[in-house]
Image: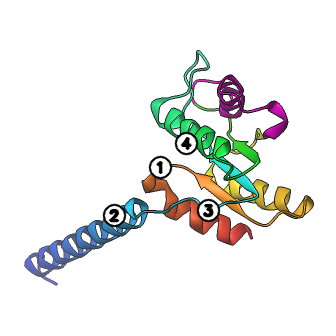
Amino acid sequence: MSRHIIRVWCRRLFVTLAVLFVIAGGAVAIFGLMPHPPEKGDVGVVIGSKVYSSGLPSDRLLARLDKAVELYHAGKFSLIIISGGVGDYGYNEAYAMADYLVQHKVPKSALVVDLGGSNTWSAARFAADYLKKHNLHSVVVVSQYFHLPRCLLAFRLAG
C-alpha cells in the first residue's frame, strides 16, 4: 500500500470516529437534558463526587445533595442511599454527604451509607442488594444530566 492510501484511510477513520463521538455526546446530552420529573421511589440514591480535603463537597456534589434534600422533603422518597468512596483528597465522600444531609434536616435514620461506592457500577450494585434485602423496588437516582445515562445503564444491569 502506498503512503497516500494509508493517509486517506487514516483521515477517514479519524473523521468517522470524530462523527461517532459527536453523535454519542449529543445523545447523552439530549437524554440527560430531557425533563425527567422525579417520580416517587422507595429510595433515593445520591452518587458521590469530589470532596475536598477539608471535607467540603465540591460544587457538583453540592448540587446533587441539594436536589436530594429537596426531593426528600417533598416526599419523593423516605430513605437516601449515599454512595461514595475515598477520593483523591483522602476523604470519604459518603461521610461528607451524610454530614451535609444531616445539616439540612435529613434525619440520620433516613440515611443508608455505602462507603464502598467508588464508581457508578458499585453504587448500583449496593443499591440493588439493599433493595432486595429490604423488599424495596424503586429508586430515584440523583446526579447531573451527563451522568444519568450511565446511571440508568448501571442500575438496570444491577437489577
Give the CA separation, mark 2 to mark 1.
Answer: 14 Å
Q: Identify residue for label 1.
A: 144
- Residue 49 circle label: none
Residue 5 x/y as whole percent: 12, 81
Instruction: Find residue 57 and report its image quarter.
Output: top right
Left or right: 50, with 118 as reference point: left
Chief secondary structure of the magenta portion = helix
Instruction: Work out whether residue 71 or residue 26 is closer to the camera in this orientation and state it.
Output: 71
Q: Which residue type carries mark 1?
A: Gln
Q: Identify residue for label 3.
A: 39
Is residue 36 on the magenta stretch?
no
Q: Secondary structure at mark 3?
A: loop
Q: Which residue type carries mark 2?
A: Gly
Residue plotted at (63% across, 49% down): 119
Q: Which residue type carries mark 4?
A: Lys
Instruction: Work out whether residue 153 or residue 11 is closer to the camera in this orientation and state it.
Output: 153
Q: Identify residue for label 2.
A: 25
Q: Earlier in the sequence, mark 2 or mark 1?
A: 2
Q: Identify residue for label 4.
A: 67
Is 143 drawn above or below residue 94 in the view shown? below
Q: Please name which of the two marks, 3 or 1, marks the residue nearer to the observer.
A: 3
Q: Please name which of the two marks, 2 or 1, marks the residue nearer to the observer.
A: 1
Magenta segment, which residues? 88-110
Is the C-beta separation of discs 3 and 2 under 8 Å? no
